[in-house]
Amino acid sequence: MLDIRELRADPDEARRRLARRGDPGILETLEEALRLDERRREILGQVEALRAERNEASKEIGVRKSAGEDASELIAAMRGVSDRIDGLDDELGGVEGVLRARIMGLPNLPDPRVPEGEEGAFEVLHAEGGRPELAFEARPHWEVGETLGILDLERGAKLSGSGFPVLFGDGARLQRALIDFMLDLHRDEHGYLEVAPPYMVTRESMTGTGHLPKFETDAYRTEPDDLFLVPTAEVPVTNLHRGEILDGASLPRAYVAYTPCFRREAGSAGRDTRGLLRVHQFDKVELVRIALPERSAEELELLTGHAEEVLRRLELPFRRILLPTRDLGFANAITYDLEVWSAGVGEWLEVSSCSSYTDYQARRADIRFRRGPGAGPEFAHTLNGSGVALARVIVALLENGQREDGSVDLPEALHPYMGGGKLTAP
């Protein structure tokens, strides 16, 4: 959530930065918020003046009564003042409610480092690892998985509809191995505290991270509890400290969590949905950091480096890209995507988004800290990133590691978890 005081102090800067997102509706919402804020302050000024007038009149009424003088006219006038105050208070409540809704509907301000442009106008910042050179025509993962007997899309669709694959045998074991490998790496080498959060969260939690109200149609919601299946572990883990004031000396807080993730992908019609490329349920290991504001940029580099190390050890060709303004997430100030090359589909596949939210989520979730005893509370900065998402990593492992005989070679990092280094057909 943006700070209305900052918007009020420099509205032209807010207009300029929000305009970079390319949505005229955002600027309309900003202008309405500024008008509502102005009216709110007008009402507060009127109420303050009327209350001061009423206080002075109350003193005068007391003096007149003490002197035995008639105060009925003044009392009647003050009843009118009280009625006006009540009316203004009612209007103030309505204005503040709409103002909060408009502020909640404004996205985060893009970081100055974010390049201008539409989806696809990203900057490639770093690339590592060569694309695999196969002596045969690479097959897509759904064919590789079917040959190995580890992936069944038809039975998944029978159980739950499209976008819910079933993994068998070594496919299920590979999924579990990747989760354990990533949790061990981030916990033991990168210093994250492992968390096992709930897989269902409240509306307040979804609102705190910026997933509501804008993305409610993409979420799976339960009745009658009004709980949401997590779209990412970012939601429960970031909200661990909702409404808290942390000790600044304890920052950064670094958490890693595994959860399945559930997304309707309501806005993905027409996009590639073959195999595991776009599914409604997938597994992900998530990294969350809560940091001091002045360390936000350094924390993003650190977190992104931790996600990159996963791909490095999985021996996958990857690149880091900086997303442009019009492909930036609603709550994000800046985002690096990590993409892996997958030989069968011949595409770069996003497997991680690492983002800084500045104080946007912290304001929504009221996550603050004190720098020391007696210091005033400040809003923290929150960051998160996939460390990493499994579905497309499995795609790349199957497609890049495939051999002409139908087997798949696995990276050395997974050998201890898989009891060997190769997937073979039964």
Image (tube, helix red, strand yellow):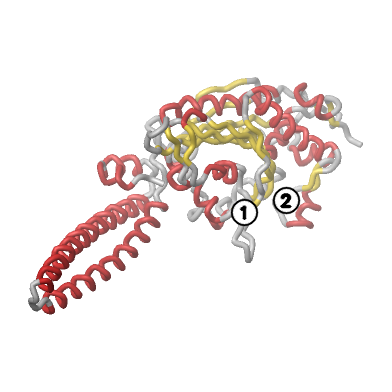
Q: CB atoms at circles 1 and 2 under 8 Å apart?
A: no
Q: Is residue 34 above or below residue 359?
A: below
Residue 366 in sight in this render: yes
* Residue indicated by mark 2: 164
The structure residue drawn at horizontal position 23% and vertical position 61%, both measured from the top left corner, is 43
Q: Nearer the viewer, residue 247 or 172?
A: 247
Task: Give the image location of residue 11, x and y in percent.
Answer: 26, 44
Q: Nearer the viewer, residue 95 or 367?
A: 367
The structure residue drawn at horizontal position 68% and vertical position 48%, both measured from the top left corner, is 281
Q: Is residue 189 above or below residue 277?
A: above
The structure residue drawn at horizontal position 45% and vertical position 47%, both measured from the top left corner, is 364
The structure residue drawn at horizontal position 48% and vertical position 54%, both measured from the top left corner, is 214
Of helix, strand and loop, which one carries label 1? loop
Q: Is residue 402 left or right of residue 324?
A: right
Task: Give the image location of residue 82, x and y in percent.
Answer: 22, 71
Q: Is residue 129 left or right of residue 299?
A: right
Residue 347 in sight in this render: no
CA separation in Å, label 1 and label 2: 11 Å
* Residue indicated by mark 1: 264
Query: Three-letter amino acid code at disc 1?
Result: Arg
Q: Is residue 201 left or right of residue 174?
A: left
Residue 146 image-quadrant placement: top right
Q: Nearer the viewer, residue 161 or 225?
A: 225
Of helix, strand and loop, which one carries label 2? loop
Viewport quadrant of the C terminus: top right
Please tell me how crowded label 2 is: few (under 14), some (14-19), or many (20+) other residues with Cα within 10 Å.
Answer: many
